[in-house]
Amino acid sequence: MIEPCLVKAKKNAGFTLLELMITLGLLGILLGITIEILWGYNKGVTETVSQIIDAKIEAKSLALMQGETVKLVFSSNEVIAYIKDEPIKKFQIADGVQLVSVNEKNLSFNSYELFINKLGLSQDCIIKIQSKDMFKVVFIPTFGSPLIFDRDISLELIYKEYL
């Protein structure tokens, strides 16, 4: 009588540690590339928003420290702080980003002058920023924290809904 050959079949119970490590490594690389692409997408607008807020805060500080009126001049690609018509500091807007308007005044062919008096007071301002793929609105009040919006909004609506 011939006994049947019992062949032990290898069971595939899951993945080996090596296969899992390779898969996780590839996912990590893809995730890193995706995050870099998304960060670069928002980076210019985010930097510009920060630059504008810094310009207003620094101009207010200069006015208080110097006891002089500071003039912020906004154009589509830069913001310059002046004391007595002398440029003090220039804030460059990121490449591919432009300032569209300040307090509803279009900056395409104009500039906008915002005065901060020696007590650090100025009018509230709303600044619209645009890049190829993104739009932001920054509201910088005389007192309080700036507000940032992803949609077009007017000063009247901000006063009505947020203040």
Image (cartoon, grey):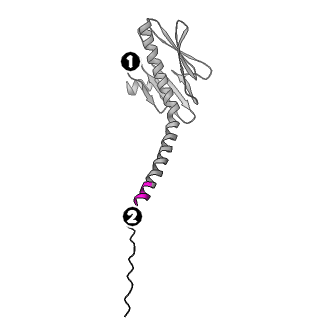
Q: Where does the image place residue 2, in percent across and percent down from the top left?
A: 38, 91
Instruction: Classify residue 10 as left or right of residue 152.
Output: left
Please say if 30 is above or below 132. below
> The C terminus lies in which quarter of the figure?
top left
Q: Where does the image place residue 97, in percent across and percent down from the top left?
A: 56, 29
Q: Is residue 20 inside the magenta stretch?
A: yes
Q: Nearer the viewer, residue 7 or 129?
A: 7
Whichever of labels 1 and 2 marks the residue nearer the N terminus, that label is 2
Quick one: label 2, few (<14), some, or many (20+) residues within 10 Å? few
Give me the C-alpha separation between circle 1 and circle 2: 62 Å
Q: Is residue 31 inside the magenta stretch?
A: no
- In the image, the segment drawn in magenta is 15-21
Can I make out residue 118 in this image? no
Please say if 115 is above or below 33. above
Q: Secondary structure at mark 1?
A: loop
Q: Which mark is residue 143?
A: 1
Label 2 belongs to which residue?
14
Residue type at mark 1: give it.
Phe
Q: Where does the image place residue 108, in percent across and percent down from the top left?
A: 61, 23
Q: Secondary structure at mark 2?
A: loop
Instruction: Classify residue 83 as left or right of residue 16.
Output: right
Q: Nearer the viewer, residue 43 or 7?
A: 7
Quick one: label 1, few (<14), some, or many (20+) residues within 10 Å? few
Quarter residue 57 falls in: top left
Q: Main secondary structure of the magenta part?
A: helix
Q: Which residue is located at x 56 percent, y 26 percent?
A: 100
Q: Of discs 1 and 2, which sits in the foreground?
A: 2
Residue type at mark 2: give it.
Gly
